[in-house]
Amino acid sequence: MMKLTKFKRSAFTMLEVVFVILILGIVASLGAEIIARVYSSYILQRAQYRASVKTELAALEIANRLRYAIPGTVVRRQSTSSPVSQAEELSSPMNYSADSYNVLQWVAYDGDSFEALDPASSTGRLPGWSGFCDLDASSRDTVKTPGSRLGFTDTIIQNLSKNSAGASTKSIADAVLFFPYDLTAYGIAGGAGDTISLDSNITGSGVGLVEQYKLAWTSYALVVEGNDLYLYYNFSPAYAAADINSTSTSKSLLLKNITNFKFQGSGRTIRFKICKEEPITADANVSACKEKAVF
């Protein structure tokens, strides 16, 4: 007969099991805390990055628009409905507290058709308007501007001024001319080839033409509404134009949740600062600021 042999196997005691469970609990709690801290840091850095990127993009958009500003036309206003008489040239002393100005407004020359080249031109790739006057061939009614293709300018203005329904609201007949050191907006009746016809109310008024000009078809305005910043355009290209809220005016949201938008001028230099909040939770957020100077 075979004899069965019993083997004794050692096992964990209750005390050892308790110690193992305790150690595993400590390790788990430490790991959870590390993971929570890493995740919290990630959320914070992501919010900071988003705020910084959004603010930088808005600041670049503002700077790109302001570089086309016609000198002397940049003004500050308290609101879009404030009278033109209260508009202040940006480099002049403030009549009110800095916090009361919510509108930065200017007339911009048409950089789109000035810098664009007409590929359909039979005489070469020429811009829409050249910015030069032939004084010998010009008169008080017409401006001869060699090297221009004003029909191309008209097409660009119509395309850029389309409203939400897709219809153009402006043409070259809505544009004006500005001459150096003169803030008068000389109205344009039309333009064809390289000849600009001036409005009838300008005819015979003794316009002092000079060799250079800038063509503008719209003003721009940066407006703080609540906690958001909007860009207004498609309104009169005149100094401190009051029709910001006209039916043809367009506006685009530049940045939400801004906490600060300040601007000042010195000569032809424009400085502005913009700050934005980016929410993390319902009770916490981060901020990012950008400051730029436009010459």
Image (spheres, grey):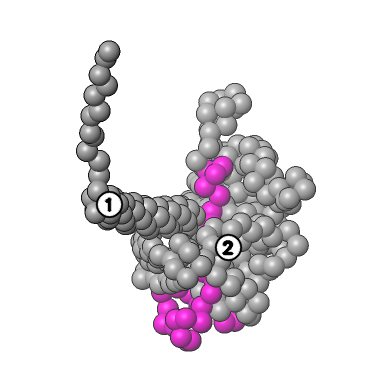
> In the picture shown, does residue 167 fall above or below 90?
above
Residue placed at 77% from the left, 48% from the top? 165
Which amino acid type corresponds to the residue marked 1 in the rendered image?
Answer: Met
Mark 1 vs mark 2: in front? 1
Q: Identify the mark at residue 230; answer none if there is no mark.
A: 2
Judged from the image, the secondary structure of the residue bearing numbered disc 1 is helix
**293 or 268, nearer to the observer:** 293
Which amino acid type corresponds to the residue marked 2 in the rendered image?
Answer: Tyr
- The region drawn magenta spans 85-114
- Which residue does the numbered mark 1 point to in the structure image? 14
Q: Is residue 269 left or right of residue 253?
A: left
The percent position of residue 135, horizontal first and vertical second, equals 53, 49
Residue placed at 24% from the left, 54% from the top? 15
Q: Is residue 28 left or right of residue 56?
A: left
Q: Tell whether label 2 touches label 1 (CB within 8 Å).
A: no
Q: Quadrant of residue 199?
A: bottom right
The percent position of residue 193, horizontal first and vertical second, equals 64, 37
153 is within the stretch colored magenta: no
Crowd rating for badge 1 (residues with CA inside 10 Å; few <14, some 14–19, many 20+)? few
